[in-house]
Amino acid sequence: MAELQSVWGWQPALYLFLGGLGAGAFITAVVLYFFDKKNNEKTICFATWAATISLIVGLLLLLSELTNPLRGMLLWQSFSNGSSWMTFGAWAVFAAVIVFGLMALLSTRKLVVAATKKWKKFSKVRSQARNVLAALGIVLGVVVAAYTGVLLMSAPGVPLWNTLLLPCLFAVSALDTGVALVEIIAVTVERKQVGPRKASKAHRLLKRFVVVLVLVELVVLFVFLNTMLSGSSDNAAVAATGALSADLLMWGTLAPFFWGLVVACGLVLPLVAAIVGLAARSKSSDSLAVVGASGALLGGCALRFLVLMAGLHADVVANAVATLIH
Amino acid sequence: MQDDTGIPRRVLLQGAAVLGVSALAGSALAAPRDRAFAQGDAESASAYNGAQYGFLVRTANCVNCQECVEACRRANATPDGVQARREVTPYKTASSQTVYVSTGCMHCEEPACATVCPAHAITKGEGGVVSVDHDRCIGCKYCYQACPFSVPHYTAEGMDKCDCCLSAGIELGEKPYCVRACKFRALNYGTLEELMAGSGGRAKQIEAPTGPSYLLQ
């Protein structure tokens, strides 16, 4: 039986999940900001804080995985090789933490009230700064979401990862989990609200996002696995290892987790919850939305762990030996 | 602190200062500048135009005595419980015959490990030998994932792999300890031209996009 990839353990897996989650949550928060900021201020505030904290925890996890974490903190030295995607990603995540964090600060009501008392022009400056941070944050969010997949894609030793479909899959999953986190936040902050709901339009928008994103993710996942199973590489060892990795996920030791957590919990459950929620058109669908969103988060997290564990290395030497004449 | 990490206090202080400044200035500005600066270094780090040193394995001669592995372990003081820089692996030929191949770093023409190393810790030096700077390695293990031959492994010092015994005191061009230990001349070392000529042109270079400097016969 194939030995699972274990050189990168749980910390990088969680880092990839939290990086994507943070980026996705921020993008969703910014969509709400441009869509209807007046009725979603609390959700935007909590979502931007959650996005910032996700990235920070992810970075700390990455540092803890290094054999020399202290040296890793010397960013300008340890992340200086421009040909490495890890360098690009580290700086992108660092920049995202700053932009997301500033947006979170400017979305925090208590801080805004205190600052407005001291500086009368603050309200106007804040509004302009938030627009700039939101636009910058969307770009950084997309970059960080895709980067979590590009990091794996640029490792030529692992056929399962060495495909453009992986950044596509991780980027869609990042948005999917980000929307899920914002859905949970939106339901939670409005739980105590009495009277007619002001943000029901936003809730419907999020549910529509869930439907679209889950369908796109299902297609990308299908194409990704199908490409691996069909062994499209010219190198026999590489093609066989890609197929073996996909086989591990779909029918091997990882299959129960793949079908149970990624597909059923992470995709089918949120899809059904969103469709039922859109059809029901009532506040009673809140708990269903939270169940669906929790499933999406669990599934997104499981996806990173499983893709890392199934990342088998191809044995290129075996291929070369097989061509020797004896 | 210095003993634990090998980072001089001065560098740490500089680091703290730069980190603070870059946080204030916004790393969005710092990142492109840093990348542009590093790009030139990256190219010079992996480009090498001289004679390329490498290994040739005569599979018919290898009896899996593990002497090369033991010699490597001793010469490079590989700690107990840590994988040696060299290993001998059984493989099947097309005619289902079992042969043994002694492998270590392939000192690739375009080493994927050096390309992905964020810290510039891996360089292709004289003779095309790929080596690791332990004062820069952060131990992120990205090089292991990038290497098509799963060569890099890790000790408390960071990444550990074959450097043709240069760090064990062998001059470039001299035989590394593993080759000296091979009684059956199964494992050979030299420039790729020399090795190919010695095989009468019958040796085959292992195929991979990185261009491994490793011949099989």
Image (cartoon, coloured by chain):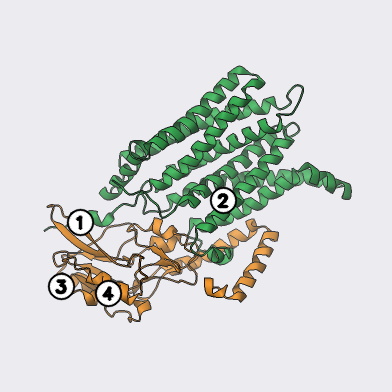
Are the residues under marks 2 and 3 on the same chain? Answer: no
4 or 1: tag closer to the N-terminus: 4
CA gap, disc 4 and disc 2: 42 Å
Q: Position of residue B22 (x, y in %)?
A: 66, 62
- Residue behind mark 4: B71
| Position of residue B104 in the picture relative to residue B59 (left or right) | right
Q: Residues within 10 Å of mark 4 (few under 14, many from 20)?
A: many
Q: Amino acid at mark 1?
A: Tyr
Q: Which residue is mark 1?
A: B91
Q: Amino acid at mark 4?
A: Ala
Q: Earlier in the sequence, mark 3 or mark 1?
A: 1
Mark closer to the observer (3, 4): 4
Q: Quadrant of the C terminus of chain B?
A: bottom left
Between residues A34 and B13, which one lies in front from this camera angle? B13
Q: Residue A283, image x and y in percent? A: 66, 21
Residue kind at label 3, given as amino acid type: Phe
In this rendered view, identify the residue nearer to me: A269 or A138: A269
Mark in the foreground, 4 or 1: 4
Marks 4/1: CA–CA distance: 22 Å
Q: Which mark is residue A58?
A: 2
In the rendered image, residue A268, in percent from the top left (x then y), is placed at 48, 28
Chain letter belonging to callout 4:
B
Mark-to-mark CA distance, 2 and 1:
41 Å
N-term-proximal mark, 3 vs 4: 4
Does B87 sit left or right of A91 as displayed?
Answer: left
Report whether residue A28 is seen: yes
User: Which numbered dot is residue B184?
Assistant: 3
